[in-house]
């Protein structure tokens, strides 16, 4: 075979391993359909008002709100109402006798909320007062200690100063309403109108202002394709940076008439059910915007916010009385009666009409994990020295979790700690479980980190894990959307943790702002990324949540876990297709070692650029092809360390596994050999694992945590699957693999009868591997014939053997010392030369 064709075969094999590695645990378990409170740019969706068919999970009902690292709107909030109704689409100006019309009644409610006790926790509900906004005092942010100062949650609103009657015409090119309304607006158009109003009125933005848009009857709004007010929601809240004018927190309420088509009698203590249903949406979204304005504040692990957890199955609590029309009411504000859904209270372990609690779980412990690193560090955030910290890295072996590495340390005076894992094991695989436990007076509860059981971040229901982060970055020095300037794009970026980056020139925002259209963030960089720059992306989220139904009661508060992943070189060729339609990530450099041939291949590189590979004293130089791949014959062996450099820095280092196997024929299992203890058998996950609910066991809801197979501590490969002879390097994400050809033709064949001397011939599937042969007298152990290689075109002559039965042991070899063994039987007899025959 020519050098060119041989290289082509190696490239083909390498690419097969790169692209076809199995994705263990990547398929979600089947489960009942539930309502997801997030979609596109919409946070905390209020379901359609005819929502009684919606269900949630038990976990969604009973798990508390956990803090996810981002802000809440503490420090006082001014609500601004925008009633957007041009002259040809007015709001309902009439009202039933004794009631206010739609707009005045909504204004009255917000005025009453502002005048009531919202800045501090309220008392128990009574006929004189009751206010769902008093639950807000439990939800601070950052490293704030437990307790929120009085006034931190005060709501400000006046009709004269904070209400806008917006008669600006609707855009002509909106959306198509599933309810066939005369007007349909997009979320982008809503954002643009809010921006126009703020610019025209000199309004304020940021975390102390909520802009609430109301639409009149027969006007629909869609956040995405077929996700509209007439079929999917009554309202939602979100954030915007329209035209780069700054962070704007906003919410929208659809007129209930477009969905219900009429009044809901019996739930209207003010006598205007249309407006009162909208008021319920106002309470829901205002509370949620305050506790989770950017999608990274307070929610349960599956995205349910303070209002969502008490809305899917509506909770109204105990009535305080009944209005003259017979309708119950459960809130009394400034002497007016309202019927409002309850809000979730962590302190009360459920939905509540009000709360007296001002305590919260903050500050949470923090844990920092860097992919491919054996160092884990964190901070208990309590400024206490002497707390003992133990970190255990668990992987699956035969379906059972086993500890493959441990490390321990003690907190310093500021609560910080650092641990180095044993055996050189590194974190960074979604099949891992990382268990952090603490010991000492008032030590935190253990933190269980299952990155592969994060639910589904692509539908905004859970947290991102390692695989999604690895495959979600695009770094370029020539972004066409930015006029050819440098940029870093991250996706999915919305509601999947507080995202930051390092190593590139740019504003380095505290939170990467996300596009509601694509789910991808484009961050402009101020200067090109050069070869020496090491760019990383970090996502901080509450990934240590352990559901209450787990042994020991779980850890309902969790911890803030930072995952840091490397980003490849600027304009590196893609090494995967990504998981977001229309978004192609740039490559991350990873290498694969073929022990059978001694070749090394690396992918995720910049086409046309030059690279150097080192294996001890062995050095090879190569230029990346158009696919961003290099393949070199480095003569790599078990236990080698192969580093890849672009001339300015080391991009990755592959720790070659100590992999050697013996296989019996076409068996599906390896019969013997060795492997690197604790490392995963086969290649890494190729797609992000998806589960039904975040933080729940894989066996019940799917995901990737504690799946896969590892090499045991003994280093024995026996019993491992033989369909892919590979191990994943947890120190680089690279793969070591080997391959042993199969026999496709032999002489003598099974059951053959030979007459006198004959030729022994073997042919392998790769037509090049040597095949040794040993012949034994049946029932004995004495060899009567041996040959080092019978894979020859003319075969190897075998002298005439004594009459009887024989066993032939055919062994296929490769350059790594791997073997595949076949045993056949034949008979030797005496006869005339006319009966002699050969089989080829």
Image: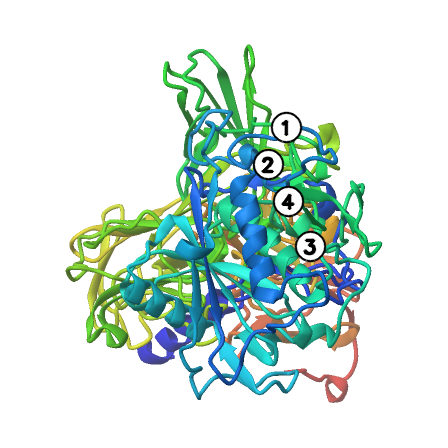
Viewer-proximal residue among 272 and 339: 272
Farthest front residue in view: 98
Viewer-proximal residue among 282 and 627: 282
Q: Position of residue 145 (x, y in %)?
A: 46, 25
- Residue underneath mark 2: 134
- Residue underneath mark 3: 702
Provide the secondary structure element on which disc 4 rests.
Answer: loop
Q: Residues within 10 Å of mark 2 (few under 14, many from 20)?
A: many
- Residue underneath mark 4: 695
Farthest right residue in view: 326
Q: Quadrant of residue 555?
A: top right
**CA distance separating discs 4 and 3:** 10 Å
The tag earlier along the polypeptide, 1 or 3, is: 1
* Residue 696 versus residue 92 in the image, above or below: above
Q: Position of residue 762 (x, y in %)?
A: 59, 73
Q: Is residue 559 left or right of residue 591?
A: right
Residue at image point 29% right, 68% down = 243
The tag earlier along the polypeptide, 3 or 2, is: 2
Residue at image point 42% right, 82% down = 169
Provide the secondary structure element on which disc 1 rests.
Answer: loop
- Residue underneath mark 1: 356
Closer to viewer: mark 1 or mark 3: 1
**CA distance separating discs 2 and 4:** 29 Å
Closer to viewer: mark 3 or mark 2: 2
Q: Are marks 1 and 3 in contact (CB under 8 Å)?
A: no
Q: Are marks 1 and 2 in contact (CB under 8 Å)?
A: yes
């Amino acid at each position: 075979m020519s050098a060119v064709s041989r290289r082509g075969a190696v490239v083909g094999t390498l690419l097969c391993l790169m692209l076809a590695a199995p994705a263990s645990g990547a398929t979600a378990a089947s489960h009942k359909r539930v309502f997801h409170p997030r979609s596109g740019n919409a946070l905390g969706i209020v379901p359609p008002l005819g929502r009684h068919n919606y269900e949630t999970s038990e976990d969604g009902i009973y798990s508390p709100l956990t803090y996810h690292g981002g802000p809440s709107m503490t420090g006082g909030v001014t609500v601004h109402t925008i009633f957007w109704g041009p002259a040809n689409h007015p709001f309902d100006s009439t009202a039933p006798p004794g009631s206010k019309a739609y707009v005045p009644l909504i204004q009255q409610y917000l005025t009453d909320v502002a005048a009531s006790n919202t800045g501090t926790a309220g008392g128990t509900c009574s006929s004189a007062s009751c206010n769902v906004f008093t639950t807000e005092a439990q939800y601070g942010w950052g490293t704030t200690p437990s307790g929120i100062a009085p006034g931190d949650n005060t709501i400000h609103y006046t009709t004269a100063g904070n209400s806008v009657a917006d008669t600006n015409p609707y855009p002509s090119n909106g959306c198509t309403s599933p309810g066939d309304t005369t007007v349909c607006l997009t979320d982008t158009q809503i954002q643009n109108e809010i921006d126009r109003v703020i610019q025209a009125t000199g309004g304020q933005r940021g975390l102390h202002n909520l802009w609430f848009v109301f639409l009149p009857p027969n006007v629909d709004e869609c956040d995405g394709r077929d996700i509209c007010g007439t079929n999917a929601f009554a309202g939602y809240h979100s954030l915007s940076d329209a035209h780069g004018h700054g962070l704007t927190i906003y919410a929208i309420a659809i007129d209930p008439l477009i969905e219900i088509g009429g009044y809901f009698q019996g739930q209207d203590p003010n006598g205007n059910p249309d407006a009162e249903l909208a008021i319920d949406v106002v309470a829901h979204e205002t509370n949620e915007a305050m506790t989770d304005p950017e999608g990274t504040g307070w929610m349960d692990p599956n995205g349910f916010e303070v209002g969502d957890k008490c809305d899917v199955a509506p909770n109204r609590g105990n009535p305080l009385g009944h209005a003259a029309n017979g309708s119950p009411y459960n809130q009394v504000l400034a002497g007016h009666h309202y019927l409002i859904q309850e809000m979730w209270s962590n302190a009360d372990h459920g939905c509540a009409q009000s709360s007296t609690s001002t305590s919260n779980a903050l500050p949470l412990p923090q844990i920092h994990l860097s992919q491919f690193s054996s160092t884990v560090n964190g901070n208990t955030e309590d400024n206490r020295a002497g707390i003992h910290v133990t970190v255990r890295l668990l992987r699956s072996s035969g379906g059972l979790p086993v500890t493959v590495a441990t490390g321990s340390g003690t907190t310093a005076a500021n609560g910080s700690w650092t641990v180095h894992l044993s055996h050189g094991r590194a974190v960074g695989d979604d099949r891992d479980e990382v268990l952090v436990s603490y010991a000492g007076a008032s030590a935190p509860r253990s933190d269980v980190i299952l990155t592969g059981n994060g639910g589904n971040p692509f539908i905004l229901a859970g947290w991102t894990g390692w695989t999604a982060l690895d495959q979600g970055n695009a770094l370029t020095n020539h972004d066409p959307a930015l006029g050819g300037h440098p940029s870093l794009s991250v996706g999915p970026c919305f509601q999947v943790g507080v995202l930051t980056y390092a190593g590139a020139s740019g504003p380095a925002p505290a939170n990467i702002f996300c596009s509601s259209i694509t789910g991808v963030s484009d961050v402009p960089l101020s200067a090109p990324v050069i070869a020496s720059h090491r760019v990383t992306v970090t996502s901080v989220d509450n990934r240590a949540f352990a559901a209450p139904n787990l042994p020991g009661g779980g850890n309902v508060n969790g911890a803030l876990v930072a995952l840091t992943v490397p980003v490849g070189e600027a304009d590196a060729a893609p090494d995967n297709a990504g998981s977001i339609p229309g978004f192609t990530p740039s490559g991350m450099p990873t290498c694969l070692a073929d022990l059978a041939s001694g070749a090394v291949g690396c992918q995720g590189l910049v086409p046309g650029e030059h690279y150097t590979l080192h294996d001890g004293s062995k050095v090879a130089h190569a230029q990346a092809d158009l696919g961003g791949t290099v393949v070199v014959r480095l003569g790599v062996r078990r236990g080698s360390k192969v580093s890849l450099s672009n001339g300015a820095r080391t991009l990755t280092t592959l720790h070659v596994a100590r992999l050697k196997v013996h296989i019996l024929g076409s068996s599906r299992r390896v019969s013997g050999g060795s492997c690197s203890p604790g490392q995963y058998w086969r290649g890494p996950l190729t797609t992000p694992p998806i589960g039904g609910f975040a933080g729940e066991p894989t066996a019940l809801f799917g995901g990737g945590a504690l799946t896969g197979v590892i090499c045991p501590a003994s280093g024995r490969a026996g019993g491992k699957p033989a369909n892919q002879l590979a191990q994943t390097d947890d120190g680089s994400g690279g793969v070591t693999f080997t391959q042993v050809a199969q026999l496709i033709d032999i002489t003598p064949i099974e059951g053959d009868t030979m007459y006198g001397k004959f030729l022994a011939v073997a042919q392998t599937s790769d037509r090049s591997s040597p095949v040794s042969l040993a012949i034994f007298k049946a029932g004995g152990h004495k060899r009567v014939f041996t040959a080092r290689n019978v894979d020859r075109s003319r075969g190897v002559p075998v002298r005439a053997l004594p009459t009887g039965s024989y066993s032939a042991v055919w062994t296929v070899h490769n350059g790594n010392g791997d073997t595949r063994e076949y045993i056949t039987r034949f008979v030797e007899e005496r006869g005339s030369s006319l009966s002699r025959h050969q089989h080829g």
